[in-house]
Image (spheres, helix red, strand yellow):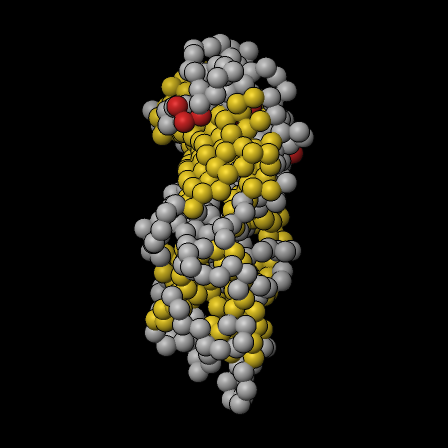
Amino acid sequence: MLEVTTNSKYSNVEISNITKIKDFKFNLYENIVYINNTIHTDINNNLELRMEDSNTTFIIQNIFKPEYKKEIIEIKYDKEQEFISNNHFLKPNDIITLENITNNSHNLLQDNLDTPNILFKVIKTTRNSFILKTANNYNTLLNNIVDIIKAPTILNNSYFYIRSNKLIKQITRVEQNNKFFCINHGLNLNDIVKLENIKYNSTNLLETYYQNDTFLYIVTTVETNMFELTHYINDKISTNSNNILIINQDSLVTNGYFKLIQSNNINSTININLPNNLTDNYGIYYNFIINDKITKLSINTKNDDILIGSCNIGSNYLLGSEIIETSNNYKKFIVDNINLLYTKLEIINIKKNIWHINCNIFDNKISYKVTYNNGDIYLNNILLSTLNFYINFIYEFDISDSNLLNNEFSIVDDKYSSYFKDILNIGLIGTNNSKLIIYINKDSLLDSEYYIRYKNNINDDFYLYKKLFIIKNKPIYFSN
């Protein structure tokens, strides 16, 4: 592609009618934004890209510790109070909180806003600035205020946090045995949370020791609309026997919340939706680097737009040449059930209705956690349905779950004869670190079917068989 300086609104390159994608300089990572697949997406994990987000490298990280904190370096005051934060990636209607808006230890917030947990709504943005008003506060007298700052100034160690309703939910009632009530809280055992404003009107419902918003708590009991907490400090449950009780009385809670800080059960999916560019400003481009364990990624076009390009899969485990899939006329790119850590994506709008994608995945090993339940097999907590296994891929089954002890997890062919080719067993099934690893080599017969042999109950004298996989040539990531 010819590179030419341009005044285009969206790009620093001009797209000519001569296209050589391999010569395009994707790797000028000037505008870097660190994002999270929970905070920056909607309830269906959709990340909506805008044309004004062009020329940006997005680094996806902090999957299981979702937080988005970014520095504010200056406040300007002309007709509106403008907060300066480079590559903040805020969008209109985002809800945020502010931290340490001070200068030489002097508070810069208006006196009526100098109180914990005041919420602000983003009303206007540019790439490096945003304008706020107060919103969504329990005290309605503190809403719709735009006069936020006492004076314009340079800031130091000042920040904003995005407040996501996927991570913060309202607590309606508490009980002294450390029970917290919240409709559809969505928490799991061992999740880590913070508590916020656990009061009935002005009465603090936390024991004096726990009246500290920075304390962490671990979830120790879960029911549908209730959970129990224990103090969590230095990455372990507190052993301070003098501070067992968190709540000082049974009570309703007015405007109290918990905030999810860490969970191993957060959805590790992200769906990236590209904008539909109807202008003559081609050259919109985005880079993505996955720096955490995302397990499902999709790129989706809108209206008449299509994707062309390729996906390359390579790995230290790969025993043959790279796996390559290409697209000439598809609308979606979906990668599932594979470790996407260190994956790189380069996406550019090269022509009206045409996006070019270059994807590099660095791991061809697909992993599953095996459990049995009432005669059914679950892989990664999902009921087994027949899978496609691909040439040159490695499949690793974690068979260490204790409910597999004294059972069997063996691969057999379509005649139920034991199959050992390119299969490695490590450890004893049902014990720590036991695994079964399968490599599908290039000589494997396409469309061959293989089954799992196991027992419903370990004392049964007979085996059950369920189809596990069919051998296919290569994955299909592009579709309509």
The residue lying toward the viewer, choosing from 202 and 334, is 334
Q: Residue furthest right?
A: 303
Picture coordinates of residue 267 (x, y %)? 53, 51
Which residue is pictured at 43% across the width and 65% down the height?
397
Which residue is pictured at 44% across the width and 25% down the height?
21
Look at the image and tell me in which quarter the N terminus lies. Answer: top left
Look at the image and tell me in which quarter the C terminus lies. Answer: top right
Residue 300 lies left or right of residue 101; in this view the side is right
Q: Is residue 366 visible?
A: yes
Residue 182 lies left or right of residue 441; in this view the side is right
Which residue is pictured at 59% across the width and 55% down the height?
185
- How many numbered callouts? 0
Relative to 370, residue 353 above or below: above
The residue lying toward the viewer, choosing from 467 and 405, is 467
Relative to 141, residue 13 above or below: above
Q: Is residue 208 visible?
A: no
Picture coordinates of residue 228 (x, y %)? 52, 63
Picture coordinates of residue 409 (x, y %)? 46, 75
Which residue is pictured at 61% across the width and 36% down the height?
331
Picture coordinates of residue 135 (x, y %)? 61, 32
The residue lying toward the viewer, choosing from 254 and 398, is 398
